[in-house]
Amino acid sequence: MADWQEIKGGVTAPKGYKAAGIAAGLKPSGAKDLALILSETEAIAAGVFTTSQVRAACVDYCRQRLQTKASARAILSNAGQANAGTGEGGWQDAVESAQLLAEALNISPESILLASTGVIGQRIVMDGLRSGIPQLVSALSPEGNDAAASAIITTDLVTKSIALETTIDHRPVRIGGIAKGSGMIHPNMATLLAFITCDAAVSTALWQKMLSRAVNKSFNQITVDGDTSTNDTVIALANGQSRTAAITEMGQNASKLEAMLTTVCQYLARAIARDGEGATCLIEVLVTGAVDETAASQVARTIAGSSLVKAAIFGRDPNWGRIAAAAGRAGVQFRQEDLQIKLGNFVLMENGQPLEFDRIGASNYIKQAAAGAYLKEDTVSISLCIGNGVGTGKAWGCDLSYDYVKINAEYTT
């Protein structure tokens, strides 16, 4: 049983945080497009970013900031323009954005981190941002999570937010998070944007290690379409306002904090996969019996990202052969004779041999129909055992529908 509980408030649930989200005229739709998260005090900051060689200005800006100063007070995020592939002009827009916010908050620009999302190749609409920042600062509130979560989305159909609470040293400790993402989602940082707040006291190096491990078990285990974004950013702040003793090395308290951080990241990652562009269901893949966690995770990612598997699930076709083929090409050694595949509770393959779809003696047509009916569930579970090793891994994705092509064929038009 988990040693924490879910609470309300998202990124403003931890002590000492405010947030805001407004419409600043960056999106043609007039929807909210400028978000701010602010810690009352300087917070330890950690980040994980896209591995793409084509990066948004905000990614390079944050990397530079965190290399010289691993702390921050504020995260400013704009939606509508990715500010990626925009050259020196885009870089100057990022620098000016931080300076404008610093002046409005009366803090150092060095304490501000940036994120952007939207159309690649488009610079931020700076007139809107310049006029919007004073309004954004005025809107800061301990209840501002929902507005901020709305202001970071683009093609998302729903906002994504969570907060958890545990007890460390007999004091409440909270972690909250918001995220956006629906397309251009694939491992090598697959989140697009996620912002996490925490009120525990934790050392800089340990907080970064915790976040990196949590990302590997969450955002780096989701896929929608096989494309990695130019803007992928996860930023986590820890401001120590819970007044617990500083966590500086791994131990019981550190393990509890990291487990809760991982749970927050996995919740947001699953929400992104379920909200994949055009998706009708979430696909969860569990792989066991591998030699280690890395191998199991690789097989799970390969299956979740297979276009043939995704298309079959959209068509409610229990075609286990596509699952087996994806596992076989994942680059992980295992014996075909050890392979077991389950679709929900339907055992499709055992010891490398195909099985009937149930055990009640009905015709194969009826069995196929039953397995196909299972694929109409909102969450489809695929389980594989590939041997007798200790390695276990999970990955999440979504089905591939006609609407995915429609959404992306018309993205800029």
Image: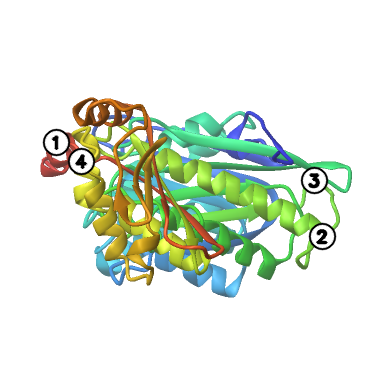
On screen, residue 360 versus residue 290, left or right, reads left
Residue that badge 2 annotates = 246
- Secondary structure found at label 3: loop
Q: Nearer the viewer, mark 3 or mark 4?
A: 4
Across and down, in percent, residue 47 comes to: 53, 62
Residue type, mark 2 in image = Ala
Residue type, mark 1 in image = Tyr
Distance, label 2 to label 3, CA atoms, is 10 Å
**Which quadrant of the figure contains the N terminus?**
top right
- Secondary structure found at label 4: helix
Task: Determine the residue positioned at 56% across, 57% down.
Answer: 214
On screen, residue 397 versus residue 199, left or right, reads left
Task: Between residue 365 and residue 218, name the one nearer to us.
Answer: 365
The color scheme shown is rainbow
Q: Which mark is residue 312?
A: 4
- Secondary structure found at label 2: loop
Is residue 99 visible in this depiction of the protein?
no
Q: Nearer the viewer, mark 1 or mark 3?
A: 1
Q: Residue furthest bottom?
A: 68
Q: Closer to the N terminus: mark 3 or mark 4?
A: 3
* Circle 2 Cα neighbour tier, 10 Å, few/some/many (<14 / 14–19 / ≥20): few
Q: Residue 242 carries which label?
A: 3
Task: Between residue 340 and residue 9, name the one nearer to us.
Answer: 340
Across and down, in percent, residue 256 comes to: 73, 52
Residue type, mark 3 in image = Ser
Q: Closer to the N terminus: mark 2 or mark 4?
A: 2
